[in-house]
Amino acid sequence: MSDAPLVLAVPSKGRLQENASAFFARAGLPLTRTRGTRDYRGTLAGVPEVEVLFLSAAEVVAQLASGGAHLGVTGEDLLREGVPDADATVQIVTGLGFGHANVVVAVPQAWIDVRTMSDLDEVASDMRSRHGRRLLVATKYLNLTRRFFGEHGIADYRIVESLGATEAAPANGVADLIVDITTTGATLAANGLKVVDDGLILRSEANLMASLAAPWGEGARRSARQLLARIAAEELARTTREIRATLAGGAAMAESIGRQFGATLPDGTENRAETVLRCPSGQVFDVVEALMAAGAANVTVRTLDYVFEPANPLADRLFARLPADAAADHVVSIGRSF
Ligand SMILES: Nc1ncnc2c1ncn2[C@@H]1O[C@H](COP(=O)(O)OP(=O)(O)OP(=O)(O)O)[C@@H](O)[C@H]1O
Ligand SMILES: O=P(O)(O)OC[C@H]1O[C@H](OP(=O)(O)OP(=O)(O)O)[C@H](O)[C@@H]1O
Ligand SMILES: [Mg+2]
C-alpha cells in the first residue's frame, strides 16, 4: 500500500479537458487513455508507474479531498466550493494559465439602484419586511454563496440550487439573482444581468493540485518529483527567452565547438564571442536594445522548450507539507503551509 503508484486525476470532458491534455503534452508528459476514449483510465507516456484517472472537473476535486488521487487538475472554484477547509487538505501546486472564470453575484440590469452588496442587503431586508418573502439566489455554488453573503452580513435570502442555465433563472421567475461563473460576460449580458460592483467572489483558473490526504509512499513521491520537475521546466521555459548575441572577443572557442557539430559562425563574427542570456519574456526587447547599444551583432531571440534547474521548488513545497517518513503515509498535515 505504501508504495502504491501515483494517481493523477484530469478532466475527461468539457473546456478544461483539451487544455489540460495540451498542458501535459507540452511538459513532455502526454496522457494516453489505455483503451480508446471511453476508457476512464490511462497512463502518462513519459513516466511509468503513474495511473491517470479521467474524471469530471468536480470529481477531480472529490478524489483530491478523499485521497483517491495524489495530483489533479481542476478549477479553483470547484475546490473552494467542494472542500470546506480546502487549504488543509489540498495544496495548490501551480496555476496553469487556462480555465479562467470569475465567480460573481449578478442581478437584473433593471435593478438600476442596486450596485453594491450593501444595496443588495437593503433589497433583501425590504423584500422580507414588505413582501414577506426572501430573496432567491440561483446557483450551483452553494457554499461559496453562503460564505460570501455571510461576510456581507446578508441573511435574508434563500438559495435555489441550479444545475444548469443559471443565468436564465431571473427571467424565468425562478430566482431574483444569481451566483455563477463568467468569463467573457456574454452569457450574463444576453440574459440582462449585471455583476454587482463588489460582487466578485473568486477569481478562478485551472490549477495543478496535490492531495495531502493521499497515501504518499516512496513510489508516488518519486513519480511526483519527476512530473513536477518537467512541469516546472516547461513553465519556466514558457516565461523565459534566450538571447544570443556576439560581442567582441573569444570566438576561437565557439568556432572549435561549432566545428565538432558542423556548425559555422556567421560572417563577421570571427573576432567576437557569442553571449547567451536568458531573461523573462517581458524583458526581452529591453535586453536586446541594451546589447545593440553596446555594439552587439547577430542578436537572436528564441523560445525554449524546457529550462531545468537543479532545484525542484514545486516538489519541495509539496513535500514540506507531507509527513517526512513515508511510513506515516495517511497522516494529513493540517495548518499553515510553511
Ligand atoms: N466559461 C466557462 N464556463 C464554465 N466553466 C468554465 C469556464 N471557464 C472556466 N471554467 C472552469 O471549468 C470548470 C468546469 O469545467 P467543466 O464545464 O468541464 O465541468 P463541469 O461544469 O463539472 O461539467 P458540465 O458543465 O459538463 O456539467 C470550472 O472550474 C470552471 O471554473
Ligand atoms: O461569461 P461567458 O463567456 O459567457 O461564459 C460563462 C458561461 O459559460 C458556461 O456555461 P456553458 O456554456 O459551459 O454551459 P454549462 O452551464 O453546461 O457549463 C458557464 O456556466 C456560464 O454560463
Ligand atoms: Mg461546464
Image (spheres, rainbow, N blue to C red):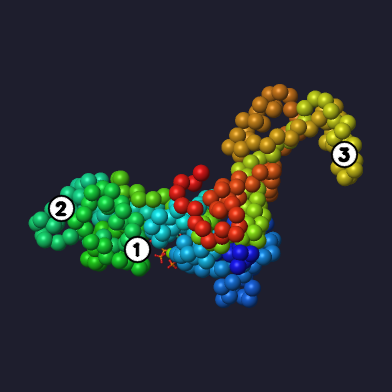
In this picture, residue 83 sits left or right of residue 255: left
Q: Nearer the viewer, residue 62 or 36?
A: 62
Q: In which quarter of the image is residue 274?
A: top right
Q: Which amino acid does label 1 sit on?
A: Lys
Residue that badge 1 annotates? 140
Residue 230, numbered circle? none
- Which residue is located at x 31 percent, y 49 percent? 199
How much space separates mark 2 and mark 1, taking CA atoms?
Answer: 23 Å
Q: What residue type is labelled 3?
A: Ile
- Which residue is located at x 68 percent, y 48 percent? 306
Q: Which amino acid does label 2 sit on?
A: Ser
Residue 257, numbered circle? 3
- Quadrant of the image containing the N terminus: bottom right
Image depth: mark 3 or mark 1 in front: 1
Q: Please tell me in which quarter of the rendered image ligand 2 is found.
A: bottom left
Q: Nearer the viewer, residue 128 or 70?
A: 70
- Which residue is located at x 10 percent, y 56 percent? 129
How much space separates mark 3 and mark 1, taking CA atoms?
Answer: 62 Å
Callout 2: few (<14), some (14-19), or many (20+) C-alpha neighbours within 10 Å?
some
Residue that badge 2 annotates? 125
Q: Nearer the viewer, residue 97 or 285?
A: 97
Image coordinates of residue 10 in percent, x first then y, are 54, 64
Image depth: mark 3 or mark 2 in front: 2
In this picture, residue 177 sits left or right of residue 15: left
